[in-house]
Image (spheres, rainbow, N blue to C red):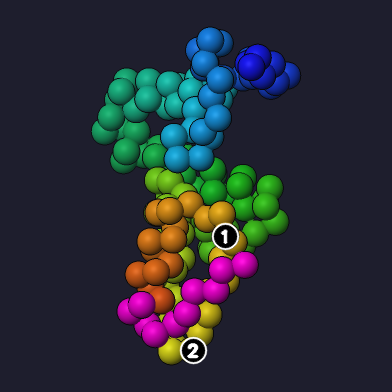
């Protein structure tokens, strides 16, 4: 069996060219442009940590939220950043006021950590998980 060819966007990642990387979900690689921007922010922070956290951090955070909310045409006040998708799913699920008889509909190919979070909130509330 031959290895698949690299896609036209593969140069945007620092992945080993000898590896066929298929998991961009739970352990996804970060695009090079994002790594460069992260490095820029780390340097900004490390140059003067007190100034960064006392004077710059919150404005940068708000600007990032504003930019993303505009891109998504979403209300900035309903947005926040989370560490990963599992934390985001947990945050949303635990904010719901589920009642017995309520249903959460999920696809049959959901990520296991999300299944666990759904099972947790439905079992505690008496709601039901419906798999489609």
Where residue 41 is drawn, which disc sits there? none
The one nearer the camera, 45 or 8, is 8
Q: With respect to residue 34, does 97 lie above or below?
A: below
16 relative to 88, above or below: above
Q: Can I make out residue 6 in this image? A: no
The magenta stretch spans residue 125: yes
**Residue found at x 44% / y 34%:** 27
User: Alpha-carbon distance for marks 2 and 1?
Assistant: 20 Å
Label 2 Cα crowd, 10 Å radius (few <14 / some 14-19 / many 20+): few
**Would you say 45 lies left or right of 98 here?**
left
- The 10 Å Cα crowd at callout 1, few under 14, some 14 to 19, many 20 or more, is few
> Quarter holding the N terminus?
top right
Tell which residue pokes out farthest to the top in this image. Answer: 18
**Residue 46 in which image quadrant:** top left
Residue topped by disc 2: 101
Residue 29 position in % (x across, y down): 49, 28
Residue 115 percent coordinates (x, y)? 44, 61
Report the magenta residues as a range. 123-132
Read off the residue under disc 1: 108
The residue drawn where x is 44% and y is 82% is 127
Whole-percent x and y of residue 126?
A: 39, 85
């Amino acid at each position: 069996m031959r290895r698949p060819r690299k896609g036209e966007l593969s140069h945007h990642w620092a992945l080993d060219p000898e590896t066929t990387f298929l998991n961009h979900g739970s352990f996804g690689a970060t695009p090079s442009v994002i790594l460069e921007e992260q490095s820029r922010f780390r340097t900004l922070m490390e140059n003067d940590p007190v100034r960064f956290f006392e004077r710059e951090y919150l404005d940068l955070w708000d600007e990032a939220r504003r930019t993303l909310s505009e891109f998504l045409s979403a209300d900035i006040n309903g947005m926040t950043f989370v560490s990963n998708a599992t934390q985001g799913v947990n945050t949303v699920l635990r904010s719901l006021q589920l009642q017995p008889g309520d249903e959460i509909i999920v696809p049959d190919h959901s990520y296991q950590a999300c299944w666990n979070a759904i099972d947790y909130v439905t079992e505690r509330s008496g709601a039901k998980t419906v798999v489609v």
